[in-house]
Image (cartoon, rainbow, N blue to C red):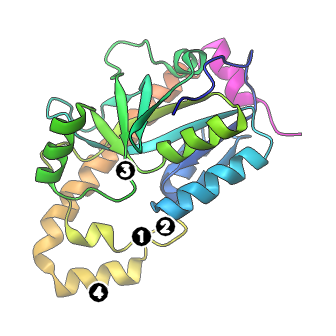
Amino acid sequence: MTSSASAQPSPSRPGILVGLKAEARLIRSIFPHAAIAASGATHAGAKREAARLVASGADCLLSFGLAAGLNPALSAGTIVIPEKVSCWGADAVCDATLRHILGGDQTGVQGGTLLHSDTVVMDAAHKAELFAQSHCPALDMESGFLAKAAEEAGLPFAVLRVVCDPADRSLPPIAGSVLSPEGGLQIGKLICDVLRHPTQIGGLIHLGQDAALARKAMISFLTAQAQTPAFKRLAGSSFA
């Protein structure tokens, strides 16, 4: 699968797909006028919301948020702006102009190919298997659906993700069961699950620390990149 390789000049109406409501709030501070949708970290939600962004009148599609690290060399907070997204046995090529606008050529940014997964990858051993098979530095659950929607609509797309859980970090089982379909956190269920399984508290603390570091890194990176004229044009225009 390939996406549109030629960028539209000066894209100014981005449609942005994220996984969680917290990511949507973070991105809203940088893109106050963009159409932003959260998948709820489900493949059905990602497919639905990617289609909705196309219907919103976007002239480009962007995928933002957290990613799981696959390359053991990448720590939490590493920015990933890939050249391609590997999804369902094929590669979708990210738009070069959008990658440049987002900061893909900045020092320390990880390029390469981002792996799409239809399911949450919780276990460090599973991450190691995926890295050995794909050689992709990281994975997420939204970018493949965004790439497919962009291809079908003839729109350019790009991805900016930040590594949250590093390759050697296994997520506590609770982390995969307390998200709401809208991408929020079910606090009541989280508290009940922690009370039933208190041994997972340590894993949740580590995950929270990684997520805080990742979000701080993304905000810092985007705030700096937002000073460039091309980024200001991308982020500053509102929908009609």
Q: Is residue 194 left or right of residue 56?
A: left
- Kind of residue sitting beneath label 1: Leu
Determine which of the numbered discs, if any, sits on residue 184 in the image.
Answer: 2
**Counting other residues with Cα less than 10 Å from the Cα at mark 1, is it few (<14), some (14-19), or many (20 or more)?**
some
> Could you tell me how many numbered marks the image carries?
4
Q: Is residue 237 magenta?
A: yes
Which stretch did the figure color magenta? 227-240
- Residue 36 x, y percent position in the rendering: 65, 48
Q: Which residue is mark 3?
A: 117
- Judged left or right of residue 230, residue 191 is left
CA–CA distance in space, label 4 to label 3: 29 Å
Task: Give yes or no for contact between labels 2 and 3 (Cβ–Cβ under 8 Å).
Answer: no
Camera-near label (2 vs 3) is 3
Residue situated in front as seen by the camera: 161 or 139: 139
Amino acid type, callout 4: Cys
Badge 4 or badge 3: first in the primary sequence = 3
Q: Is residue 49 above or below residue 72?
A: below
Return the residue at label 1.
179
Q: Neighbour class for label 2 at 10 Å: few (<14), some, many (≥20)? A: some
Query: Label 3 sits on what residue type?
Result: Ser
Say if mark 1 contacts mark 2, CB within 8 Å: yes
- CA gap between label 3 and label 1 equals 17 Å
Q: Nearer the viewer, mark 3 or mark 1?
A: 3
Closer to viewer: mark 1 or mark 4: 1
Q: Quadrant of the C terminus?
A: top right
Q: Residue furthest right?
A: 240
Q: CA distance from mark 4 to mark 2?
A: 17 Å
